[in-house]
């Protein structure tokens, strides 16, 4: 009887921990707390939510880290995670910003970090980032040319041609907003990458998106684990009470005899 009680207590503790750790994610699903990426501003990336929308302008990856794949803090393997800088600005709006008189093109846009582990999604992000990187290089070359030789109305066609070549990739993503890694390597890679674009960490969303692809069932696993752990906790609690009552009755019966 004593061993049974000890086992039930251990099961209660473990399942209780899983229920507690899973409550925050499950709560977001229950409350359907969502963030529309494409209408969000930087400060909207400061609060936990399920984010979904389309990723347009992508840069990176600026870091690739091999990380432990965990379920509520329990290691279940390893995975490679890639980190990208992403803007929610669509290409039409980006073209308008390019053509405006602003001296801070990227400052007019909302930026956030997306972490991607799914191989198919990584491939899509890499492809979109490469196209955008090439376009930005052509844009920089054109700006340098104007700075050296001056700009006149005849150069407008060059700009129009460049804008016509602007990539139009859009990737539908969905995922939980999570705290960024506190790993020192990650922070260095991120800060160096941002500095190369005259950014710092205050210019981007505080939380990152753990991006999953279109059709992903974000939150399903979290909810299942939460309810399973809660059920195990309640069952073990009831069994523990029953065992304690039986033990108390047996002890009392022995005293009577």
Image (cartoon, helix red, strand yellow):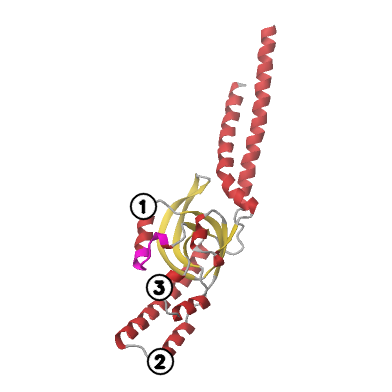
Task: Report if residue 187 lies within the magenta region.
Answer: no
Q: Which residue is mark 2?
A: 153
Q: Against 78, is 53 above or below?
A: below
Residue 249: quadrant of the picture: top right
Q: Residue furthest bottom?
A: 154
Instruction: Give neighbour class at mark 1: few <14, some 14-19, many 20+ (Cα, 10 Å).
Output: few
Q: Nearer the viewer, residue 80 or 129?
A: 129
Q: Against 121, is 137 above or below?
A: below
Residue 184 is tagged as 1
Instruction: Give neighbour class at mark 3: few <14, some 14-19, many 20+ (Cα, 10 Å).
Output: few
Measured from the top left, where is residue 167 in percent x and y?
A: 49, 78
Q: Nearer the viewer, residue 233 or 118?
A: 233
Measured from the top left, where is residue 181 in percent x and y?
A: 43, 53
**Quarter of the N terminus within the rendering:** top right
User: Which residue is depicted at the point 69% across and 7% down?
Assistant: 256
Measured from the top left, where is residue 195 in percent x and y?
A: 34, 64
For label 3, the SS is loop
Say if residue 69 shows up in the picture: yes
Q: Are marks 3 and 2 in contact (CB under 8 Å)?
A: no
Residue 70 is tagged as none
Observer-side mark, 3 or 1, equals: 3
For label 2, the SS is helix
- In space, the residues marked 3 and 1 are separated at their CA atoms by 30 Å
**Image: magenta residue range:** 193-202
Q: Which residue is mark 3?
A: 104
Instruction: Give neighbour class at mark 2: few <14, some 14-19, many 20+ (Cα, 10 Å).
Output: few
Q: Main secondary structure of the magenta part?
A: helix
- In space, the residues marked 3 and 2 are separated at their CA atoms by 22 Å
Q: Nearer the viewer, residue 175 or 34?
A: 34
For label 1, the SS is helix
- In space, the residues marked 2 and 1 are separated at their CA atoms by 49 Å
């Amino acid at each position: 009887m004593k061993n049974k009680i000890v086992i039930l207590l251990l099961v209660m503790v473990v399942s209780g921990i899983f229920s507690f750790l899973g409550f925050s994610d499950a709560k977001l699903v229950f409350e359907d707390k969502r963030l529309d990426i494409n209408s969000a501003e930087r400060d909207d990336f400061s609060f936990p939510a399920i984010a979904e929308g389309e990723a347009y302008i992508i840069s990176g990856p600026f870091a690739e880290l091999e990380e432990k794949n965990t379920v509520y803090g329990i290691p279940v393997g390893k995975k490679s995670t890639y980190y990208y800088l992403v803007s929610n600005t669509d290409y039409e709006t980006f073209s308008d910003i390019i053509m405006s008189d602003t001296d801070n093109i990227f400052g007019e846009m909302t930026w956030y970090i997306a972490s991607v582990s799914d191989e198919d999604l990584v491939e899509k992000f890499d492809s979109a980032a490469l196209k955008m990187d090439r376009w930005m290089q052509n844009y920089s070359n054109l700006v340098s040319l104007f700075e050296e030789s001056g700009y006149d109305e005849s150069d407008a066609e060059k700009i129009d041609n460049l804008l016509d070549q602007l990539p139009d990739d859009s990737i539908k993503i969905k995922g939980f907003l999570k705290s960024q890694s506190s790993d020192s390597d990650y922070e260095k890679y991120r800060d160096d990458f941002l500095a190369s674009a005259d950014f710092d960490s205050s210019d981007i969303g505080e939380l990152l998106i753990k991006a999953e692809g279109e059709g992903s069932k974000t939150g399903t696993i979290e909810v299942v684990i939460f309810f399973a752990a809660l059920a195990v906790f309640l069952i073990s609690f009831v069994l523990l009470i029953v065992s304690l009552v039986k033990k108390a009755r047996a002890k009392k019966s022995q005293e009577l005899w």
